Amino acid sequence: MIRAATTRDAAACAALYAPYVTDTAISFETEPPGPEEMARRITHAHAWYVLDEDGHIAGYAYATPFAPRAAYQWSCETSIYLERGRRRTGAGRALYETLFERLRERGFHRAFAGMTLPNDASAGLHRALGFEPAGVYRRVGWKLGAWHDVAWVQKDLHATDGCTRPPEPLT
């Protein structure tokens, strides 16, 4: 079942995320956030969904502000994390599609995602969901003894071609 996350999911989300921080360059964090920090992130996200299997959190996807300046308010940054062994099961697609629907309802026009390279699983998921390349930051992060590139991709949630006035401000 996919449902909106609450702060009660913070410990499970933190536990799922921790190996991405400690064992991979997928996340550029170097210390895993604890439940309190994860609860803060859930509270401040534009939207956050979890894959809940009878009380077990097997994945999550969320959207946060793209950048702090007001003109960026109709764009957001998305991320998704699945527990190991969940690749190519449809879980990522289901989480992201639920997230995108909520973002559309809220009036967002663009979703952006960054992924450390190489990351074939993430690149494949984002491509399959209609994200298009936006650029690559070369050797932007140092982790696990090496420099890493980050590829950025973007997805249109609402068309903006032909718009002659700004959308209504987000609430």
Image: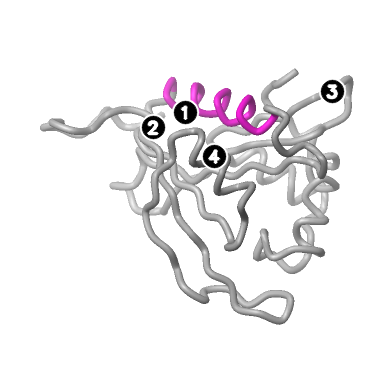
Could you tell me if the residues under marks 4 and 1 are in contact, i.e. CB atoms within 8 Å? Answer: yes
Identify whether 168 is placed above or below 143: above
Instruction: Name the residue carrying label 4.
Output: 63
Q: The residue tagged with tag 4: helix, strand or loop?
A: strand
Instruction: Name the residue carrying label 3.
Output: 53
Amino acid type, mark 4: Ala
Instruction: Name the residue carrying label 2.
Output: 108
At 74% across and 40% down in the image, what residue appears? 82
Query: In front: 13, or 70?
Result: 13
| Mark 1 nearby-residue class (10 Å; few <14, some 14–19, many ≥20) | many
Name the outermost residue toward the bottom: 145
Camera-nearest label, 4 or 3 = 3
Could you tell me if the residues under marks 2 and 1 are in contact, i.e. CB atoms within 8 Å? Answer: yes
At 37% across and 38% down in the image, what residue appears? 110
Identify whether 5 is placed above or below 153: above
Nearer the N terminus, badge 2 or badge 1? 1
- The answer to if 103 sits in the magenta stretch is yes
Q: How far apart are marks 3 and 2 (CA)?
A: 29 Å
Nearer the N terminus, badge 3 or badge 2? 3
Q: The residue tagged with tag 3: helix, strand or loop?
A: strand
Secondary structure mainly formed by the magenta segment: helix
Instruction: Name the residue carrying label 1.
Output: 103
Could you tell me if the residues under marks 4 and 2 are in contact, i.e. CB atoms within 8 Å? Answer: yes
Identify whether 94 is placed above or below 16: above
Tell me where the magenta segment starts and ends, as one range: 91-105
Nearer the N terminus, badge 4 or badge 2? 4
